[in-house]
């Protein structure tokens, strides 16, 4: 596999803060890779180092085998939207994209096409300072695309988008992948990435805790998770624990979340204890995998759990 992005021993220290600690990971060409981690885990810092906006304290961040400043036309290699607030507030949307096109050495008339692509044609002549966060996200994306880049790096691009906007963004990222581009997209919210990403890089408290296919990640960290609805949750929970399972109970509901046993095993335990079931379902979710992966490294489990 030829990695399009590669971190090798990548480390960034800001005085006493170790923002990124000896990160090693690779991002596959032509796939959507999610960069998942709680707030403050080190995602933005890592992305900035790939883009040459921050220099590593040690290690390297390579784009298709080279540092970004070694590429003769970096905007054609990689486009990035790191901060929707970075668009000039008193500049018209169209002019922000034209300016970016000019800097990238691309024809200015591309600006109209790009604004259309991100759904901002109707407000092309308006000043970005008056845009909502979601509109700024779209504008930042248009700016990122000016060089028709092979790789797209997006930091929390779904922040500020409404549910329609999120669906639109996901469809666009899938389109990029279908065109053969590489997408590296960060989020601290699992729901945003679930069902979208092929691969994951997971970071918690500056350290990489997972890198590979999203499926493999779920398998590795999740084990079995079974949702059980029954008429005697306390009785079943005790029996499940005796059999070696772990149980979490939904407050106010009769649902149990069992890990460490299969659905068949839980079903047999229920039968042996004469507990009536009205639901029995094996669950695989990115959210659970992520919570488990970061459990002993992150202090803000509540946010992702
Ligand atoms: N320029 C800086 N100077 C000092 N500390 C910084 C700087 N940039 C980031 N940090 C610190 O480095 C750590 C990682 O921050 P970073 O912004 O990379 O995390 P993140 O995963 O992107 O979080 P978020 O989702 O909140 O943006 C944090 O503790 C942050 O406070």
Image: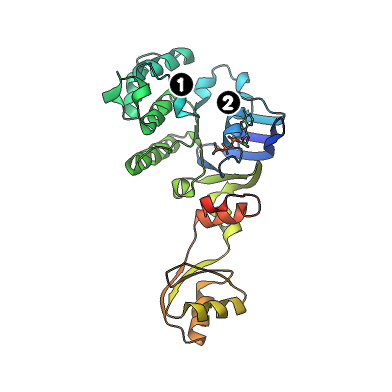
Residue name at image x 62 percent, y 75 percent: 244
Q: What residue sits right under mark 2 in the picture?
A: 51
Q: Residues within 10 Å of mark 1 (few under 14, many from 20)?
A: many
Q: Quadrant of ligand 1?
A: top right
Q: Badge 2: few (under 14), some or many (20 or more) residues near its Cα, within 10 Å?
A: many
Q: Residue at x 50, y 46 (%)?
A: 198
Query: Viewer-proximal residue, 30 or 115?
Result: 115
At 58% across and 63% down in the image, what residue appears?
223
Label 1: which secondary element: loop
Question: Residue 62: x and y, percent?
Answer: 63, 29
In the picture, measured across the screen, residue 37 lies left or right of residue 56, that is: left
Marks 2/1: CA–CA distance: 14 Å
**The label number, if any, that marks residue 147 in the structure image:** 1
Q: Residue furthest front?
A: 252
* Percent coordinates x, y for residue 108 in the rendering: 38, 13
Identify the residue at the far left of this view: 122
Q: Is residue 289 above or below residue 42?
A: below
Res 156 visible: yes
Q: How many marks?
A: 2
Q: Say which quarter of the image contains residue 170.
A: top left
Front one among 300 and 67: 300
Q: Position of residue 116 (x, y in %)?
A: 31, 26
Q: Is residue 148 visible?
A: no
Asked if disc 2 and disc 1 are in contact, CB closer than 8 Å, the reply is: no
Q: Quadrant of residue 222?
A: bottom right
């Amino acid at each position: 596999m030829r990695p399009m992005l590669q971190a090798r021993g990548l480390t960034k220290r800001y005085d006493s803060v170790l923002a990124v600690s000896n990160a090693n990971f690779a991002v596959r060409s032509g796939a959507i890779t999610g960069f998942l981690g709680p707030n403050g885990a080190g995602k933005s810092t890592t992305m900035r180092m790939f883009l040459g906006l921050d220099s590593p304290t040690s290690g390297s961040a390579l784009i298709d085998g080279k540092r970004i400043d070694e590429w003769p036309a970096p905007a054609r290699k990689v486009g990035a939207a790191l901060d929707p607030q970075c668009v000039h507030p008193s500049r018209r949307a169209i002019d922000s994209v034209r300016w970016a096109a000019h800097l990238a050495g691309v024809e200015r008339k591309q600006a109209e096409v790009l604004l259309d692509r991100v759904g901002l044609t109707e407000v092309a002549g308006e000043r970005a300072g008056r845009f909502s966060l979601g509109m700024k996200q779209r504008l930042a994306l248009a700016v990122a695309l000016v060089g028709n880049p092979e790789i797209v790096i997006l930091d929390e691009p779904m922040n500020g988008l409404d549910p329609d906007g999120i669906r639109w963004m996901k469809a666009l990222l899938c389109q990029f992948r279908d065109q053969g581009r590489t997408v590296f997209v960060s989020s601290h919210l699992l729901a945003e990435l679930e069902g979208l990403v092929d691969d994951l890089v997971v970071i918690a408290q500056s350290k990489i805790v997972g890198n590979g296919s999203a499926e493999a990640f779920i398998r590795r960290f999740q084990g079995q998770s079974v949702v059980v609805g029954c008429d005697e949750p306390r009785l079943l929970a005790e029996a499940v624990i005796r059999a070696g399972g772990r149980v979490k109970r939904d407050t106010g509901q009769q649902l149990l979340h069992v890990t460490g046993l299969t659905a068949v095993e839980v079903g047999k335990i229920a039968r042996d204890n004469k507990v009536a079931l009205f639901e029995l379902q094996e669950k695989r979710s990115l959210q659970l995998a992520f919570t488990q992966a970061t459990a002993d490294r992150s202090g803000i489990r509540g946010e992702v759990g």
